[in-house]
Each structure stands twice: as C-alpha cells, then as structure tokens.
Amino acid sequence: MDEIKRMLVALESIARDLHRLADLVTVEEQASVPSGVSRLPLVIRSEQVATFLAQHGPASRAEITEATGVPSGSLSEVLKLGPFEQKRRGLWGLK
C-alpha cells in the first residue's frame, strides 16, 4: 500500500510538471506569433462572438471585429458555423 501511495505522489508531481510545461509551450507559441496576429481555435472565437452579441445585441461584422478582435476571415467562418444568423441587413445576432 505504501508503494502505491508513493507512486501516486510521483504521478501527481509529474502531472503538475506537465501542466507547467504545457503552459510554457503555450506562452512560447504565443510569443512566436507576429504582433497583431493571434491564432485561436474557431470554437474560442465563436464563444467570443457569442458573448459579445449576447451582451450587445445584433451588430455588423465591422463592429464585431472591432469589439472582439476576431479577424475578419475567422469571423466569416464563425458566423457560418456558429449559432448566428443575419438579423437585418448587415447585422448579425444569436439564433
């Protein structure tokens, strides 16, 4: 039983080290991206847009891009794939 406890403690320590390493890799990756460019998965971009629209109501693509920082190319994909619809001419909102 003591051997199992020692192994669990060692595994927990390794897990903490791996989490720290993952955080460092993320920081390094972000540091290697040119300024003004941020690469995030579309699911995160979609959450950003959904949060903005939930708080502010329908908005134009330009307003969404300005407020959220989502690049226009990513925004096009997000609006196609996410829970969004065109409400009025030029304005997008949540479905």
Image: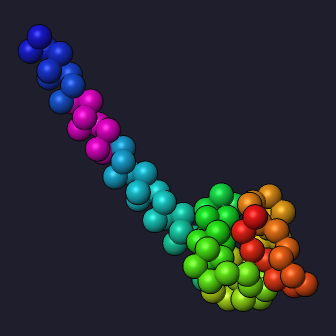
Tell me the quarter of the picture where residue 47 sits: bottom right
Q: Is residue 77 left or right of residue 63?
A: right
- Residue 19 magenta-highlighted: no
Q: Residue furthest top?
A: 1
Q: Which is nearer the eye, 14 or 64?
A: 64
Q: Quadrant of the C terminus?
A: bottom right
Q: Residue furthest right?
A: 89
Q: Position of residue 34 (x, y in %)?
A: 63, 78
Which residue is pictured at 79% across the width and 77% down the height?
92
Query: Is residue 65 among the parts visible in the rendering?
Result: no
Query: Is residue 92 among the parts visible in the rendering?
Result: yes
- Residue 12 magenta-highlighted: yes
Tell me where the magenta segment starts and ends, as one range. Answer: 10-17
Which residue is pictured at 29% across the width and 37% down the height?
14
Q: Quadrant of the N terminus?
A: top left
Q: Position of residue 36 (x, y in %)?
A: 63, 84
Which residue is pictured at 53% across the width and 69% down the height?
30
Tell me the quarter of the picture where residue 35 sits: bottom right
Tell me the quarter of the picture where residue 43 sits: bottom right
**Color scheme of the displayed model:** rainbow
Q: Is residue 19 left or right of residue 30?
A: left
Q: Residue furthest left?
A: 2
Q: Which is nearer the eye, 71 or 61?
A: 61
Q: Is residue 21 above or below residue 91?
A: above
The main secondary structure of the magenta stretch is helix
Q: Position of residue 20 (x, y in %)?
A: 34, 52
Q: Is residue 10 above or below residue 64?
A: above
